Image: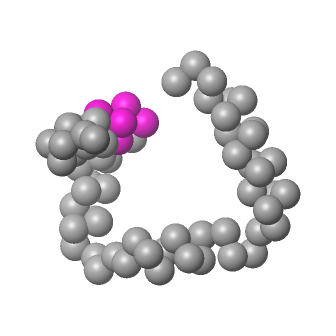
Amino acid sequence: MKTDTIIRNEGMEILAKYLGLIEAERFVMLIQREPFDYTKWQENLFANMTIEEISKNAAEYRNKNKNM
């Protein structure tokens, strides 16, 4: 199991890689500023999708991002 520090560092590296350092910092500030219920968000994330659509999207994402 990874420590909180490792998870935090890896998360910031990923955010910086895909958003750039400034946008990554902005993202973190937005998350800290707004109340965010991850569990509620997760419940609704795929609410309007069938299992087939979710599976298809996941496979497409995996194929597109194989080298990451």
- How has the structure been colored for display? one colour
Residue 22 in view in this figure: no
Give residue 63's position: percent from left, percent from top. Answer: 72, 29
Give residue 41's position: percent from left, percent from top. Answer: 49, 74
Between residue 21 and residue 60, name the one nearer to us: 60
Q: How many marks?
A: 0
Give residue 21's position: percent from left, percent from top. Answer: 26, 37
Give left or right: position of 44 versus 63. left
Q: Name the residue rendered at 68%, 39% in the picture.
A: 61
Q: Is residue 22 magenta?
A: no
Q: Identify the residue at the far right of this view.
A: 52
Give left or right: position of 36 versus 48. left
Quadrant of the image occupied by residue 6: top left
Q: Identify the residue at the far front of this view.
A: 1
The magenta segment is: 12-18
Between residue 4 and residue 25, name the one nearer to us: 4
Give left or right: position of 42 versus 49. left
Q: Is residue 17 magenta?
A: yes
Between residue 6 and residue 28, name the one nearer to us: 6
Above or below, 51 against 25 in this view is below
The quarter of the image holding the N terminus is top left
Above or below, 25 against 42 in this view is above
Give residue 12's position: percent from left, percent from top. Answer: 26, 41
Which secondary structure dominates the residues rendered in magenta?
helix
Q: Name the residue rendered at 69%, 76% in the picture.
A: 47
Q: Name the residue rendered at 42%, 36% in the picture.
A: 18
Q: Name the residue rendered at 52%, 24% in the picture.
A: 68
Quadrant of the image occupied by residue 29: bottom left
Residue 29 in view in this figure: yes
Above or below, 68 against 1 in this view is above
